[in-house]
Amino acid sequence: MKRMIFWSGMLGLVLGANGAFAQTSGQSLRPVVRPAVAPPLNIVDVAASGTAIEQVMRPKLRSDTIKGQAETALALATSAAGFDAWVSGFKQRATRQGIRSATLDPAFRGVTFDSDVIRRDRNQSEFTKTIWQYLASAASDRRIANGKAALAKHRTTLEAIERRYGVEKEVVVAVWGLESGYGAYRGSNDVIRSLSTLAYEGRRGAFFEEQLIAALKILQNGDTAPRNMTGSWAGAMGHTQFIPTSYLAYAVDFTGDGRRDIWSEDPTDALASTAAYLKNAGWKTGQPWGVEVQLPQVFDYAQANRSTKKTPGAWARLGVRDMSGRKVANHGRAAILLPAGAGGAAFMIFDNFAAIERYNAADAYVIGVGHLSDRIKGGGPIRSSWPTDERALTFAERKEIQQRLTRAGFNTQGVDGRIGPNTIDAIRAFQRNRGLVPDGYASSALLQKLR
Ligand SMILES: [Ca+2]
């Protein structure tokens, strides 16, 4: 799962630098991990009441009219009728991929179509959050306090995991906090039922069928039993919400009982699996994910770009300093990230930013994990102000920006509602052309100028 890759994961996509998040209520947690295809992004707001915040990249199918609801109900009834036949066909495909009937039969015993899963898949809210609204939840006082308590409770285990994988315990705890509220919201859906429903009739059938095959391999390995394999409605499992393919690739047995058990109350295997995942993604021990910085009065904003990397010393010569006015320590080459454009906080981000991104590609998620880990470690809040008079753009508005830019001669290479590198480049070109600060930020103010 990676940046600019779209997840499909469980749901959403990455909106790129200007990420806005769509929020779904009552959602479960989501998977995270990067798939060969596109993983979903989702972030769980633990502090609240199991409310998840997700990024949505695609237009959602809405059924908010009575007619739409009736059509949905009819479609779901029709779908349920075809489910058993689909399962029969799927079992043949699974057999050809090495899944034995001794695994398939108990896995599908009593499994029925789950119309609630499809409703959740289709009813993503259009409501979006800005980066500062997202961070207020991701690093709320409550989530910070719960993280400190979780770290204290599992300190010995987390220190052993840190020694084995080289990933700092506060970072592992922060992922845990965002993915499941430190284990409080792991999801109680039957994973085989959810994945087979989504593979059969969801929007990304091929992706979910791949996940279903992976889930059956997990059962065939004997790591857990069919009805004990629970997770989010979209198949993300355990304390740190691994999707099945990521589990197969990265989960570890840290307790030494021979099973990679990420479903139990004991979070040990899940936390070690997260550390193993980050290590595999290139985690560098001791390197920060990022450091909040202040930019000089005169700064070439075209350099605030993920592909422009310099040492902290080189950035310091351009006037980039930490919030105390000092040169940032030399942790390696870094880029400057402006998640809310020139009007908000700036971060000097190191390679570990990209490692967290492998877990979930949304900038806001990565900053959320990183900042929460800093706070759990005792660090202070982000000091810069945010452009709070701005609001999150809707999907339709993001498309309108792309349409208007392209029409004005600044080609976004397509109109898909996602603010990716091509759109950011087009925004910067437009801004330069109009004598504006070329920060590439897609804002409601920018849309006004385009109109
Ligand atoms: Ca184990």
Image (spheres, helix red, strand yellow):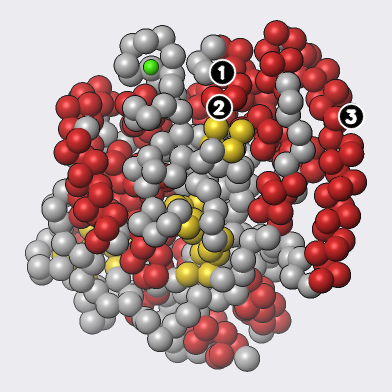
Asked whether mark 2 and ligand 1 are closer than 8 Å, the reply comes as: no
Look at label 2 and name its amino acid.
Met
Assign a secondary structure to mark 3: helix
Disc 3/disc 2 C-alpha distance (Å) = 23 Å
What residue is drawn where x is 50% and y is 16%?
Answer: 223
In the image, residue 169 sits, relative to residue 56, either above or below, namely above
Instruction: Tell me if label 1 and label 2 are in contact, CB under 8 Å.
Output: yes
> Mark 1, residues whose alpha carbon is within 10 Å: few (<14), some, or many (≥20)?
some
The answer to which quarter of the image holds residue 194 is top right
Left or right of 215, for residue 138: left
> x, y (%) of residue 241?
47, 38
> Mark 3, residues whose alpha carbon is within 10 Å: few (<14), some, or many (≥20)?
few
Q: From the viewer's side, name the closer residue of 249 and 286.
A: 249
Considering only order in the chain, which callout, 1 or 3, is on the residue closer to the N terminus?
Answer: 3
Look at label 3 and name its amino acid.
Ala
> x, y (%) of residue 12?
60, 54
What residue does disc 1 label?
A: 225
Q: From the viewer's side, name the closer residue of 40 and 322.
A: 40
In the image, residue 171 sits, relative to residue 424, either above or below, namely above
> x, y (%) of residue 305?
40, 62
Disc 3/disc 1 C-alpha distance (Å) = 24 Å
What residue is drawn where x is 35% and y is 57%?
Answer: 47
Residue 229, numbered circle: 2
Assign a secondary structure to mark 2: loop
Instruction: Tell me if label 3 and label 1 are in contact, CB under 8 Å.
Output: no
Instruction: Tell me if label 3 and label 2 are in contact, CB under 8 Å.
Output: no
Left or right of 436, for residue 144: left
